[in-house]
Structures are given as C-alpha cells and as structure tokens.
Amino acid sequence: MKIISIIWRALFITILFSSVVQNTMAFDSTAIVRQGLADLRLQKSWEKPLALKGNWAFAWKKLLNPNEAKGFTTYTEFPKLWNDNIVDGIPLTVQGYATYGLTILLPPRHGSLALFLPDVYSSYKLFVNGNLLEANGKPDSIPRNYKPHWEPKIVVLPINADTLQLVFQVANFSHSKGGPNLNIQIGNSEYLLLEKDRNIASDFLLAGCLFMGGLFFFGLYRFGSKDKATLYFSLFCMVYSYRMIGSSLYSLHAILPDLNWELTTRLEYITLFGSIFLFIQYVRNLYPEDFYKPLLTVLSFICLSLVALTLVTPATIFTQTINPFLLLMFFCIGYIMYVFIKAYLNRRIAAQYALISIAVLMIVQLIINLEYFGIIIPSRLILFAGYVSFFFLQSLILSFRFAYTLQMARKQAEQGLLAKSEFLSTMSHEIRTPLNSVIGMSNLLLRNRPREDQREQLDVLQFSAQNLLSIVNDILDYNKIEAGKIQLENIDMDIVAILKNIVTGAANIADAKGIGVRLEIDNNFKNMVTGDPTRFAQVINNLVGNAIKFTKEGEVLIDLQLKQKLGNKVTLLFTIKDTGIGIAKEKQHLVFDRFTQADSSTSRSYGGTGLGLAICKKILVLQGSQLMLESEVGMGSSFYFTQTFEVSDKPLIKNNLYEKVSAVLDKPLSGVNILLVEDNRINVLVAKTFLESWGACIDVAENGQEAINLLDLNRHQLVLMDLHMPVMDGFTAIKKIREDGITIPIIALTASLPAEIESLVTGLAINDFVLKPFVPDELYKKVFFYTIAFKKDLNLVH
Ligand code: ADP
C-alpha cells in the first residue's frame, strides 16, 4: 500500500512539473523588435504567439498622436517598468506619461492576426495605422483627466495590411509602478480569442468552486464540527475565490468594465493579505503542536496591518507593499512546508496530504509570481490543475480530520456506554444481593405464621422490596435494550398459558383493590407458536400491571383475538383495556418515552419510573410490532398491538403438572437430594428453608471447589450453583463437572438480568437458571421439573 501511494505521489508531481515546463513557454519570447521595427515578413507559422519585445521608439512625457511619428526622439526597452528604466541617462519617474512606437512588417498572406494586450500600469491607448483600436482607462498628461483600468484585451489587426504602425500611449498617476511590464504578443486571432475565453471561463469556474467549497466548509463548521481549522479554511476559500477573478487576468473586469479601479485594486490587495492571514491561522489550528506560536503572532500582525494600510492609504502608497509582501509570502509557504513536514514526522492526521498540497501550492505561487514579473506566461490549464489539486488536498485533510473526530467521538460514546452498562450491572448485582436477602427473609417470616399486625408490616416490607427490585430491573433492562444487547429467543411458547399465568398473578393485586381482571381468548386460536416467551410475558405483565395500577374501580380486560391465519403464520391482536384514570390526548405520545409519566404527580400517587411503556415499545419494535394507545381521561385506556407468530408444530404442554402433584402431596420434593452451592449465608438460609419445607434434602457447598469435592452422584439428583463465589466460581466448577462427563442437571443461580443471562451461560452446559432473588414458586417449579418430572419421566404431554 505504502509503495503504491509513494508511486502515485511521485507520478503526480512529475506530471505536474513536466506540464509546467511545457506550458509556461506558451509564446516565443526572443527579442524581435530592433530600433522600433519588427520585421516578421519571413514568419511562416502563427500558431505560437510572438512577444513584441525589444527596442521600441519612445517619447517620454509626450502623448503622441499617430500622425506625430516624428515626435519619437529615442528608443527604449519594451516591456520595462519606468521604475527601473533610464533613458538617455535620465531615470524615468513612476508617475508620468509616454508614447511607444513600433512598425511591424508582415508577410503578404498572413491570415487573421491579433494582438494580445496585457494590462499596463495603469492606462493606455493603442493606435494601429492611424486608428484607435483599443484603450484601457484613459491616459492623459493631466492627472485629473486620467483614468486607470486593467483588463487584458485581444485586438484583431487589419486583415490585408502588410505594414502596421503601432502607437501606444501610456500614462500612470495612480500606482507605485508605471509603464509596461508584460509582453504584447502577436498571433493567430482565432487562437488568441479562444484562449481569452477559456481563461475567463476557467477563472470563473475556479472562483465558483472555491466559493461553494468555502460555503460548504463554513456550514460544516457552523452546524457540525466547530473546528477552528475548518472555519479558517472556509474563510480562506471564500476570500481567495475573489482573487481568481480579481487579479492576474482580471476576468471580473471583462464582465464589469465600469468597476472603480481604486476599489478593485484595494480588494485585490486586501484579499491577498487576508488570505495569507487566514491560511496561517488554518495551518496553526490544523497542527498546533508543530507551529511556533510567536511566529504566528508576528505574521498575523503584519498581514492585518497591511490590510489596514490598504484600507486607509491611496493606491500609490499601499501598492508599494506588494514586492516585500511577496517575499514574506514565500517565507510563509516555506515555513508552512516545514510545519507540514514536522506534522508528517509526528504522524498527525492526514499530514501526507498536507505535504503534497503545499508542494503544489509552492509551484502554483512560483508560476504566478514568475508571470507577475513578466518572466513567463503560464497556461491557465496548469494553474487551474494546480489550484484544483491544492484545494482538493486541503479538503481531503479536513474531511479526514472531521471523520477522525467523529470516529473518536463514537469510540468515546461507545466506551461511555460500556462503562455505564458495566457500572449498572455492578450496581445491579450489589443492590440485588441484599434485596435477595430482604425478599427471601420476608418470605420466610410470612410462612412462620406471623401475628396479624406483623403480617401487615411484612406485606409492606415485601411490596416495597419487590417494587425496588422491579425498578432496578427496569433500568437495567432498558439500558440493555438501548445498547442493542438483547437477543430475542425464538422458541416454542404457549401464549394462552402465559396469559393465564399473568392473569392469575394479577388477580391477587386486583382483588385487593376491588377491581376485576378478565381474560378473553379467541376460540379459534389453539396453537403453540414460536417466539420469545420471556419478552412477551414482560410486555403483557407491564401493560396489565399499569392497567391495574391506574384503575380504581371497574375491571381490566385482557383480550386475545385471532386476526389472520395464513399458512403457518398467525396474526394476533392483544388488547389490555381498563376503566381507570385514562391519559389526556396531548400526553398520549409522551408516555412511551423513557422516564416520562402522563402527570408529574403520577410517581407520587402511583409510583413507577416511567420506563415500563418505553421498554414495552422497544421490545415490540424489535419484533416488528407497534404499541398503540386509545384513551380518554376518566374513561379508561386501551393499549393494543398486533403481532405475527409462526405456528409451532408442537402440541400444547401441560404446564400445570406440578400444581396437580403439589395438590396431592404435602411434601412434593420428598426423597430429592440437592447440592446447593452458594457462598452467601442468607441466600443459603432462604433457599434451604424453602426446599426443606417442600421435603427436599440439602447439602451445602460454599464454593465451586467444595462442590466438586462434595458432589455424590449416588446421592444428589440436582445441583443449584451460584455463579459468583470465592475460591472457585460457578463457571469453572460447572466446566470441570461437565469435563468429567457428569450429566447431572445443574441449575445456575444468578442475580443477573434475563438479557444478560444468555451471554453469561452460553457455552456453560447448564440445564436452566433461577433468578435471584428467587420467587419461591419459580424455584419450586424448576427443581420439581429437573428432579421428579425429569427422573420419573412423567408424561408431560396432553
Ligand atoms: P410507570 O408506570 O412506571 O410510571 P410507564 O412507562 O409504564 O411508567 O407509564 C408511563 C406513564 O403512562 C405512567 O406514569 C402513566 O402516567 C401513564 N399510563 C400508563 N399506563 C396507563 C394506564 N393504563 N392508565 C392511565 N395511565 C397510564
């Protein structure tokens, strides 16, 4: 990969350089004018324009008309700035006026020719064979009547003339440079006109792209990253976009020729100083550790002072700053290159692109400056490619940076989530272990025939402890679901049996409140289906629990209707309807949000955390279903959802076997020997008391190692194994037992939540698990199943 990228870069730079060399010499620049005469009669090809360079006739401080050819008194080099020109021993002044003269001799058949006239400091008029063919501003000997203007022009020459008399009047009273600086060229008119159009088009295209790019990055900064580097780069793009059309070839002036010269020149200078200022800020924010800060202060100060100077002084003054500033600019580019090399060595983000981009920028700036000093006239294509590559690479740096920041933020968020989830699971374990004891002990106390007043107090104690447990469970559960960590089961389930169980459980609470609970099942539905029974029961339990909680009188109806039967799929509609307090229309969409209750007084009057419905909704959404609500204040609420299940081919299981057995036998677990592995003495006490009350015989081991030592296959029919213990934990012990080929049923005891259990016990060859704090009934059912029902192979099927 590395080699490929190095080759790619080398190729890129080679192509760039070779095209620079090829394209910069876009015209022939050998001096062809001697003593005011260019003899081109032998010229055959006009494909490549010729620079009309050499000794032109000259008259200083005279604006000669075409008929005053005798007014030329001497010759001078053309093009040459008046600033450094001495004619006949007299140095020329920057401000002044002069006329240049040239005779061109052409071959008889030369086709259509044209002159390329670059901008001159700072106004001119061109007469050819006595006619005024072109002007830029208005040259005049009196400053008041003089008007500067800059715009490169193409002048088509008279077609049949074989001799051309050029009279070129130039005046400057506004700039710190005076006279011609760039070559006038002669060439094929079609070629020159096309070239001009192309240049204007490419300048505007670049300016538009840059401005849009700048806006895009500004939007990114404003609405997203808030990264200062992005901000400075966006401003740099926007400011620099003006320079694409307002400097060099002045394409803007071709479109708006009446723009005020002072204004556009000011803008040209301000955007130059400003863009360098912005670019320095950008680089400093991009790689702050690699940038020498005091230098930033000095450079910024210089740039901003120059901006201020440009704003307040006339052009004759502020334009003097350009040459020293160009030196400073090259220093800046050099220093930025040094910063990028440092950044690259320090392995900063996207520094390799920064390096290439600055190399490209250097080349572009070099070309522009060579052009500025009249050394070359570069092809616009090369500048275009250079600019596009530079801005493309800079954008790449910022995109990398943006993507990197996002990645980091995501990583941090994920770590935060992980930490939160770990914290919550630890907290859950910590809270649930003592809660286990509280619930277990209150269960035990309630069995020991307490006095009536004690029973009431114990009921309150047990209710509160259960409530606390369900709150902890809800928070953990919601967290798991939100982190996308629950995996839904797809096993056989008996929906009717689950509903009946829930109704039986709920009936006790409803009875106590004096309300009825009714279950209605569609007669046409008699199947086992496949799904996640735990999650299904959780949803119904929650909805029924709420219905009872928020109803003072009347009844709660749980209704199951078969909506559709198609192939082996059934669509069922579940409705939980109550005659309770109802929910106001405007609150109805809120109650499904986490920690939201319809009324702020709800938690005070009814308890709850506002998580139940959020959990139900999420569980149903995971199964492709939607929880709906219809409700009216004071009239009651109706929560409903439809869910499609696959019909299972298994017949319905008799799940009330244990009840029958329990009904006949006083001590249903008589003769069952169980090895209980548990380090918490209170848990041991609770489990032991219950199991012994059902007739089972219990041996206790305090850790995994002790369990392995104590396990006696002739005596024990079941192992109840805690998972977290000192010396040797349950995981290791179970693994060791199974490695020895022992198949005795093992039920894990765990305080973890259902959502976590799957990941906990995968790979552990356990038969089942019981959640702590155990509900006595559940513990009994499971122990019964794996000892009596399992061993005696009772007929469990209808
Ligand atoms: P919690 O019951 O723990 O407050 P839920 O998410 O289960 O949280 O319910 C959110 C809110 O929706 C409740 O606080 C209550 O205001 C409203 N609500 C839920 N079910 C009913 C219902 N059957 N009747 C009236 N209001 C209800």
Image (cartoon, grey):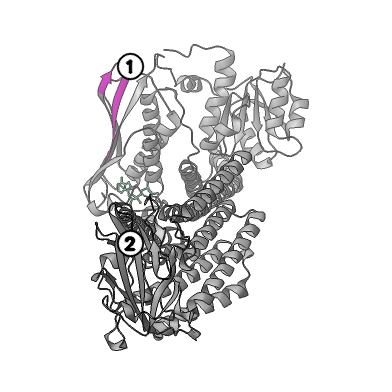
Q: Which residues are magenta?
A: 564-579
Q: Is residue 174 left or right of residue 325?
A: left
In terms of depth relative to the viewer, which is nearer, 630 or 253?
A: 253
Question: Where 617 falls versus 393 (above or below)?
Answer: above
Query: What amino acid type is highlighted by mark number 1?
Result: Asn
Query: What amino acid type is highlighted by mark number 2?
Result: Leu
Q: Quadrant of the C terminus?
A: top left
Query: Which residue bears the numbered disc 2?
Result: 115
Q: Which residue is painted at 59% across and 39% down in the image?
A: 4
In terms of depth relative to the viewer, which is nearer, 446 or 163?
A: 163
Residue 171 position in % (x across, y down)? 35, 80
Q: CA distance from mark 2 to mark 1?
A: 87 Å
Residue 643 position in % (x across, y down)? 32, 30
Q: Quadrant of the N terminus?
A: top right
Mark 2 against mark 1, which lies toward the viewer? 2
Helix, strand, or loop for circle 2? Answer: strand
Q: Main secondary structure of the magenta part?
A: strand
Question: Where 351 falls versus 232 (above or below)?
Answer: above
Q: Which residue is painted at 45% across and 52% down in the image?
A: 385
Q: Residue furthest right?
A: 709
Question: Where 326 falls versus 215 (above or below)?
Answer: below
In terms of depth relative to the viewer, which is nearer, 656 or 50?
A: 50
The image's mark for residue 568 is 1
Q: Is residue 534 left or right of residue 105?
A: right
In terms of depth relative to the viewer, which is nearer, 457 or 331?
A: 331
